[in-house]
């Protein structure tokens, strides 16, 4: 009659290992001899357990998608960042900071890098292949000349009616006016010269030994300054006093740092935070020099055309007008 298992008649606990009757004498007789066999059985059980665990992991269902109140569960993808390289006239150094801050608030995906200089110098760089996307000049002639030489982007049809705008007008040009600048005669706050009362005649005062202006060969404000001196009849008397800066911003630095006693500058610079409380100025009459109608152009080599048109639209919008006016510009 077969022997009953030792634990028959009660709930059996699942043992880690169960040895048959034949194995028990071997275990008692020689524990040393059994050790390799025992370790082998342990390894088999461990391997089976590991395989079972891996199988359960590989077949685990994916986590459930989050509940949605309706519609697509995917968030809209952020707009791809775009970069614009802008060449800008020196008189825009401060106003453009304010304009671009507002533009970036509305279009955070568009990053704008600016390079400032005399308009004529920037024009020459663009003609020689400088990688700018958009050019903001201190006059309209340089942008128009670039367009005439095939450097402007193609016009855009905003109305979708075959080359005409929505109101039947022509397609929008890549060349655009954005502001009218003004020329002023500026002296430091501690100057003994009464520039507000004497106007251009203040330059004849013996205490004015050096007069700063931008280079007339490359800077529209320099050309306007020279024209005003001639038109107002003082050029011959002050010619020996003239100190020429590469651009209007450098001319302003000459006066601010004591290198000149007066300067013919842009009103946008003397109204900037850097100079606003440092001096006094007289507005040169508009009929004393060619008008400073300032314009820009989207360049043919532009790498982010859509972003450039968005910036052009903002600079010419009613929303930008108060920011331009803060620095003494008028609407074109």
Image (tube, helix red, strand yellow):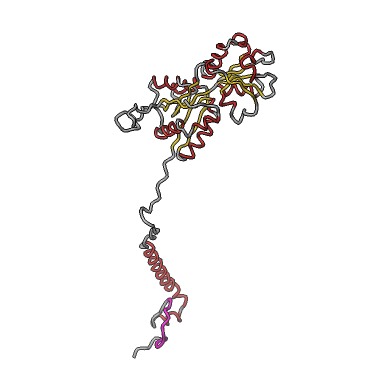
Query: Which one is in front, 13 or 21?
Result: 13
The percent coordinates of residue 13 (x first, y second) are 43, 81
Query: Which one is in front, 136 or 232?
Result: 232
Image quarter where the N terminus lies is bottom left
Q: How many marks?
A: 0
The percent coordinates of residue 120 (x first, y second) are 49, 20
Identify the magenta region.
7-16
Magenta segment main secondary structure = loop
Residue lying furthest front: 197
The percent coordinates of residue 181 (x first, y second) are 52, 23
Is residue 242 covered in magenta? no
Q: Is residue 181 left or right of residue 23?
A: right
The percent coordinates of residue 303 (x first, y second) are 41, 32
Locate residue 2: give its quadrant.
bottom left
Residue at 47 percent across and 40 percent down: it is 108
Residue lying furthest bottom: 1
Residue lying furthest left: 162
Query: Which one is in front, 216 or 265?
Result: 265
Residue at 41 percent across and 32 percent down: it is 309
Is residue 15 covered in magenta? yes
Q: Is residue 25 left or right of residue 166?
A: right
Query: Which one is in front, 54 or 208?
Result: 208
């Amino acid at each position: 009659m077969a022997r009953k298992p030792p634990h028959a008649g009660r709930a059996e606990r699942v043992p880690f290992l169960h040895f048959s009757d034949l194995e028990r004498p071997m275990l008692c007789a020689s524990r040393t001899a059994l050790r390799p066999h025992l370790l082998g059985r342990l390894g088999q059980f461990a391997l089976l357990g590991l395989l079972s665990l891996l199988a359960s992991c590989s077949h685990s269902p994916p986590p459930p998608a989050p509940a949605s109140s309706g519609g697509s569960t995917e968030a809209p993808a952020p707009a791809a960042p775009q970069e614009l390289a802008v060449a800008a006239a020196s008189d825009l150094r401060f106003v453009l900071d304010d304009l671009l801050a507002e533009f970036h608030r509305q279009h955070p995906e568009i990053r704008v890098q600016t390079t400032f200089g005399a308009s004529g110098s920037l024009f020459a760089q663009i003609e020689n292949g400088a990688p700018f996307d958009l050019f903001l000049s201190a006059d309209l002639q340089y942008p128009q000349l670039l367009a005439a030489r095939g450097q402007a982007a193609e016009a855009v049809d905003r109305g979708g009616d075959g080359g005409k705008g929505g109101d039947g007008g022509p397609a929008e040009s890549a060349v655009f006016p954005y502001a009218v600048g003004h020329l002023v005669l500026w002296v430091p706050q501690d100057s003994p010269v009464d520039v507000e009362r004497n106007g251009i005649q203040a330059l004849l005062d013996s205490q004015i030994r050096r007069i700063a202006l931008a280079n007339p060969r490359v800077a529209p404000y320099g050309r306007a300054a020279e024209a005003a001196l001639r038109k107002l009849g003082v050029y011959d008397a002050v010619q020996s006093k003239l100190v020429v800066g590469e651009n209007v911003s450098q001319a302003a630095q000459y006066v601010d740092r004591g290198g000149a006693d007066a300067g013919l500058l842009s009103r946008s610079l003397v109204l900037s935070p850097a100079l606003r409380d440092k001096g006094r100025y007289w507005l040169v009459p508009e009929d004393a020099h060619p008008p400073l109608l300032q314009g820009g152009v989207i360049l043919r080599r532009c790498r982010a055309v859509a972003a450039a048109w968005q910036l052009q639209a903002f600079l010419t919008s009613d929303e930008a007008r108060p920011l331009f006016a803060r620095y003494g510009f008028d609407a074109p």
